[in-house]
Image: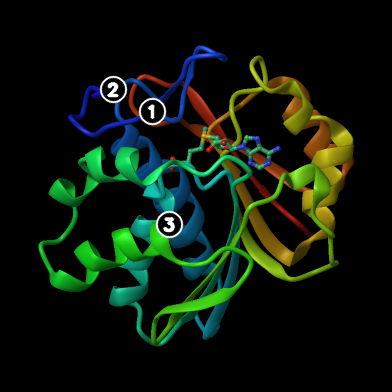
């Protein structure tokens, strides 16, 4: 489907839920995950030379390629990007996505979008000198959670009213457990219960203005 900013999204027909905001997939990803997540982390960790990112729900790879683009502009930081996707988007569908039209017209970005979809699962793959990608074809519920390694979490599961099991306190606790102290969690949802659960888990929760046509989003920081 084309969203209002001209960028594509996918519709999960069974769930009747899109992978991004219908008001603008690219705008939403840029704003929620890059601007309010990655840029915020960079602003507060200016001396850091490494970042570990966890994405919940790789889907179209839009957040991933936008982060690759950032890695190309921040060569002093090494990006370790782990993304979970139990239901990978098939190759034919990936070829139809129009994101490359909106990305810098440099060969590296264009090639990396295909590569990030085509590369092996469950293996750490060097996409750039300063960007490694680990794709796990697993559900968040099933992954082995190790404490304290992620600096930034892109929590991009389907909405709480469509996939409630991803937003329950036990799952949020699992994610928080995997975050480093001062790690940042961002999501497009601003559901009250999710904010309360994140607070109960000890995080400092900020309700921020949302992307176009969405009132609010959430950023939460681990102490
Ligand atoms: C809102 S879409 C994510 C969009 C994606 N970040 C993108 O840029 O296209 C939610 C994604 O979560 C994936 N997903 C569904 N169940 C999941 C689970 N249990 N654990 C992790 N990811 C899951 C879906 O397949 C889908 O790709």
x, y percentage for residue 41?
Answer: 53, 64
For label 1, the SS is loop
Figure quadrant of residue 163: top right
In space, the residues marked 3 and 2 are separated at their CA atoms by 20 Å
Q: Is mark 1 within 8 Å of ligand 1?
A: yes
Q: Is mark 2 within 8 Å of ligand 1?
A: no
Relative depth, front residue between 145 and 93: 93
Figure quadrant of the N terminus: top left
| Mark number, residue 64 | 3
Q: Is mark 3 within 8 Å of ligand 1?
A: yes
**Which residue carries the number 1 mark?**
10
Do the residues under discs 1 and 2 have CB atoms within 8 angstroms? yes
Q: Is residue 207 shown above or below 108?
A: above
Q: Is residue 154 visible?
A: no
Q: Residues within 10 Å of mark 3 (few under 14, many from 20)?
A: many
Q: Residues within 10 Å of mark 1 (few under 14, many from 20)?
A: some
- Color encoding of the figure: rainbow
Q: Is residue 72 visible?
A: yes
Residue 87 vs residue 100: left or right? right
| Mark number, residue 1 | 2
């Amino acid at each position: 489907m084309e969203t209002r900013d001209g960028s594509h999204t996918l519709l999960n027909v069974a769930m009747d839920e899109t992978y991004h905001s219908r008001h603008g997939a690219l705008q939403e990803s840029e704003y929620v995950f890059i601007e309010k997540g990655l840029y915020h982390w960079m602003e507060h960790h200016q001396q850091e030379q490494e970042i570990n990112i966890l994405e919940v729900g790789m889907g179209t790879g839009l957040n991933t390629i936008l982060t690759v683009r950032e890695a190309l502009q921040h060569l002093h930081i090494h990006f370790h990007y782990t993304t979970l996707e139990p239901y990978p988007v098939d190759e034919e569908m990936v070829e139809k996505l129009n994101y490359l039209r909106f990305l810098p017209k440099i060969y590296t970005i264009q090639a990396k979008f295909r590569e990030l979809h085509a590369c092996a699962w469950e293996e750490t793959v060097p996409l750039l000198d300063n960007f490694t990608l680990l794709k796990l074809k697993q559900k968040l519920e099933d992954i082995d959670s190790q404490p304290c390694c992620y600096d930034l979490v892109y929590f991009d599961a389907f909405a709480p009213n469509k996939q409630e099991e991803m937003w329950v306190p036990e799952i949020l606790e699992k994610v928080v457990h995997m975050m480093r102290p001062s790690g940042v969690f961002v999501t497009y949802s601003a559901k009250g219960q999710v904010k309360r659960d994140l607070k109960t888990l000890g995080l400092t929760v900020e309700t921020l203005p949302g992307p176009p046509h969405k009132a609010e989003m959430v950023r939460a920081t681990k102490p």
